[in-house]
Amino acid sequence: MAELEVKSMTETQLRNLRRQRTKEMRLQLTGFGLMIFLTFMAFGMVALDFDPTFIMGVVMLFAFIQVILQFYYFMHMKDQGHDFAKLFMIVGMFFAISFCVTFIYIVWIGSPI
Amino acid sequence: MSQATAQKRGFWSVIWDYMTTVDHKKIAILYLIAGGFFFVLGGIEAMLIRIQLAVPNNDFLSAGLFNEVITMHGTTMIFLAAMPLLFAFMNATVPLQIGARDVAFPFLNSLGVWLFIFGGIFLNLSWFLGGAPDAGWTSYASLSIASPGHGVDFYALGLQVSGAGTLISGINFVTTIITMRAPGMTYMRMPLMTWTTLVAGVLIVFAFPPLTIGLFLLIFDRMFGSNFFIVEAGGNTIIWEHLFWIFGHPEVYILILPAFGIFSEIFATFARKRLFGYSAMVFATVLIGFFGFMVWAHHMFTVGLGPTANAIFALATMAIAVPTGIKIFNWIFTIWGGSIEFTTPMMYALAFIPSFVMGGVTGIMQAVAPADYQYHDSYFIVAHFHYVIVGGVVFALLAGLHYYWPLMFATMLNEKLGKVTFWLFFIGFHMTFLIQHFLGLWGMPRRVFTYLDGQGYNAANMISTIGALFMALAVIVLVINIIMTLVKNEKVGRDPWGDGRTLEWSLPLPVPYYNFAQIPLIRGLDAFWIEKKEGNGEMLPAESLEDFHMPNNSIIPFVMSFGLFVASFGALYFASGKEWAIDAVADLPEKPWAFWVLVIGLAITFISMITRSFKDDLGYYVTKEEVLRDLEERERGAK
């Protein structure tokens, strides 16, 4: 059996780790608060009868910000060692968006361009 | 568990061993056997097509049977022969090339091969159960919804099952290559075979989900009463064409990129030179993979997408010629000035360059959208894609079979018979398909079961059929060669070609089941070659000799795949005779048991999944003593 070596951490390492985790927790909570706030704003705009075109644009923008917050803060894409995950997500999104655009233009709308 | 005891075991215990194996080398052999079987099946279908078309007004096959034969020829060759055979070589080489003891997910590797085998068997059972699919390998929805009987259902379900296996294997290879490289094996030191496998794996991950979705929509329409492609109910058949080609175009790159990888290895080995322009080759591979997703609509120029859409896709298609050209020139520069050895794999590799370029040039011709209106649905297209798939992929498979045979079986295929195979195949291939370009330009449409006398097609079709006979002869010689080699069973030692450059040739043959006694240290591109030239010809170890961990065998993947095989029959007969079913199957006798077969099949799969989740299988350790004993036995020649 390969033995697992267990080393206890030094005082400084422990302190650094604790500091990092506090920071991480603060970021998570900030992100969460921001997302709740954005959702609240979206609902609020609809409740206050803003101009629909305006609402559509702003809500799309909010959604985009939420996606980024979700990926980078909640799903840890900002952390190290996620290069391939990042690459795959971005390439996948690029493909998916281009497929959707084509479908909307040349299948759904149906008029040849 | 060692090789010596394995040889003493009985026949059934060997069968059981292969059914439960998670070892990538044995899975490679499973892929090779199953893929080879389907390759022969597809080849027989090809011969039937050519016999039917040899003379005008032939009635060797009826029109309906002809449609079934062309559909099954295309489907079998792409999904059940070419791709699994490439997986065979990927499995056999990639873990050895990157210095790993197995793939990242050995269990999934086994699941992948069994899903493919059961999917392939299911698809081919259609011949005995009321007729094969007859809507072409593209199975365009306007045809496939109307196709009477259960043929297309076999297509949709069979490909769904085997496609799941392919997707699983693709994910597995991507993970393996990213996470399991030996110390020192940086991305830019990976052999080209590994690089092309990585890119092909990524393409599988992105390209197979659209196929899965398309097939599910087709399954729902044909078997469960939905209306995605049913025009009377507001469906749209063009959606199938888009989904199919979003998958279908990357699919041809999934096939050709590993073929490029095999050829890159062969060129460097038998020209005894480092691959010219390695980084440009890597760049070109990635670029081809990326562009592969931007061009699918060039299969649909005549659908009526409009001039702007056609122009965009035409331009993107032409752009692919640039990275492909980079590759062709790099191969030529690799052999330029090398000390070339004309072995069988090298002959295929040398023949591949002009053959593939011819296929590529006609590809550029078709990329010109206005010109494509003339070529569309003619034999010109048939000639083009056979030039790239046979001249590229099949040449690579045959070359790879000869080249990697010693790595997989520790024997060598006969070189003389290999060269006979090569010349027969090479002549037969050009004879069959070169003339088909002209047939297409003279106006012969594809997918017709016969043609009239006096249209000027007679002589050309006869020549084409004779060429196909040559290819059949070549395959027969190859089979004889394989049988002779297996019977003789003359074992060869390490580095049997004498000029091995990459890590896999540094291993003793037969390769121990744990691959590496010690994970090697990689000091550069062509790791083994560097040690031969600068070191003592042995790989330096990157770790001390210690116990290491290996996965346990498991029968669960087999059972899981079998469950889906059973469930497929349930789904297939579910709509038979139901009043809500489409016209194609509404008149068939009702099968009340179909629902229960579906349930039982899915239950088998889910129960095996649950078993897998709850049963802790932590694998086992190979002890240091066993490895030392192996090394010592090899030292004194006991193995």
Image (cartoon, coloured by chain):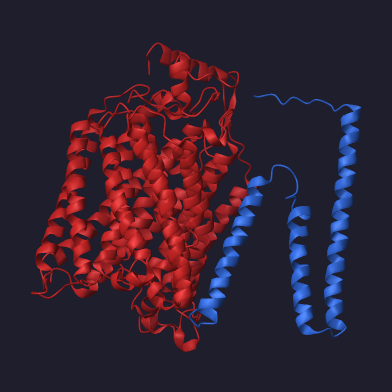
Q: Residue at x 58, y 28 (%)?
A: B184
**Residue B193 image position (x, y, % from top left):** 44, 39
The front one of A111 and B216 is A111
Q: Residue at x 84, y 68 (%)?
A: A38
**Horizontal side of residue A7 vs B608, given as left or right:** right
Q: In which quarter of the image is residue A6?
A: top right
The front one of B547 and A47 is A47
**Residue B75 image position (x, y, % from top left):** 34, 61
Report the number of numbered marks. 0
Q: In which quarter of the image is the C terminus of chain B?
A: top left
**Horizontal side of residue B497 vs B580, given as left or right:** left
**Residue B346 image position (x, y, % from top left):** 29, 35
Colour of chain A in the rendered structure image: blue
**Horizontal side of residue B302 vs A91, given as left or right:** left
Q: Quadrant of residue A68?
A: bottom right
User: Which residue reaches farthest top?
Assistant: B636
Decide: is B110 above or below B304.
above
User: Which residue reaches farthest bottom?
Assistant: B232
Decide: is B546 above or below B420.
above
The front one of B260 and B212 is B260
Residue B104 visible somewhere in the drawing: no
**Residue B336 image position (x, y, % from top left):** 32, 33
Q: Quadrant of residue B491?
A: top left
Decide: is B1 above or below B284.
above
Q: Residue at x 15, y 66 (%)?
A: B52
The front one of B305 and B554 is B305
Residue B611 visible somewhere in the drawing: yes
- Chain coloured red here: B
